[in-house]
Image: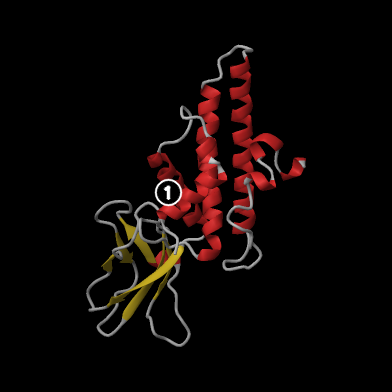
Amino acid sequence: MANLQTFIDAAKALLQAGSLPAEFAPAEADWADFVRAALARYSQDRPRRAHADYAGDGAAYDFTLPAGWDRALSVVEAVEYPHGRREPVYLQRRDWTLYAPGTSAEKLRLLRHTPGAGETARLFYTLPHMADAVSSTVPANDERAVAWLAAAEGCHVLARRFAQTAAPTLSADAVDHQSKAAEYTKLARELERRYHAHAAQAPGASGATLDWDDALSPGRGDYLTHGGPAER
């Protein structure tokens, strides 16, 4: 099972982190940030989906959001009421709201219904993906795509670092740094292109079955010295 370190190691391998000059190499904490940024972006494209049930009492119309609800990233997909009918009944958007969104008082508020005793309202909502030292919530088929995004985040950082150290002269070092900045920018775009191509497939699709090291290993052409696939 993949975990945070799995994604960090994959991003490092894609960018050949061991060969980066020390003055430009990201710190270990930076790699974790690249993965978290990738997970946040991936969560917008393929969020986790969950539901929570609320038992009615004939009086309550405000309901506490589930414990895992993320104030920044979770969204309501639907509210079913009353839950349990053979043909599900979903409330229209005007029938509910999120009261005090983004605050500790945030709740699901039913505006036109009050579930009675014995009735249940079901909330369908999304959750962001996560990865920690033990596990991650990313499906196995999408792990490689998240690694591509994390590596792309690293490319953008490296491009900025090389660009910022390219002095406005025609010295060999300045020209080399400018070239490296351009190459990392190009590589970031290629990795993002791969991610978007994968994300465009239906979840669980079997079309993306490349190896983890398919993109940038020296044996298949180092993008930072020989250009991307379109140039070979």
> To which residue does mark 1 refer?
36
**Could you tell me residue 12's position as x and y percent?**
50, 44
Q: Quadrant of residue 216?
A: top right
Q: Quadrant of residue 16?
A: top right
Please identify the quadrant where the N terminus is shown. Answer: bottom left
With respect to residue 60, does 191 lie above or below?
above
Confirm whether residue 155 shows in the render.
Answer: yes
Image quarter (top left, top right, bottom left or bottom right) of the C terminus: top right
Between 93 and 5, the residue placed more toward the observer is 5
Q: Identify which residue, 169 or 213, lies in the foreground.
A: 213
| Residue at x 51%, y 47% (from the top left corner) | 11
157 left or right of 177 in image: left
The residue nearer to you, when weighing 166 against 9, is 9
Q: Position of residue 210 (x, y in %)?
A: 64, 59
Q: From the viewer's perspective, is residue 155 above or below residue 106? A: above
Few, some or many residues within 10 Å of mark 1 (<14, 14–19, 20+): many
Q: Position of residue 55 (x, y in %)?
A: 27, 78
The answer to whether 176 appears left or right of 52 in the picture is: right
Q: In the image, is 223 to the left or to the right of 91?
A: right
Depth check, front residue: 46 or 184: 184
Pick out the residue farthest to the bottom.
Answer: 86
Q: Position of residue 87 (x, y in %)?
A: 48, 85
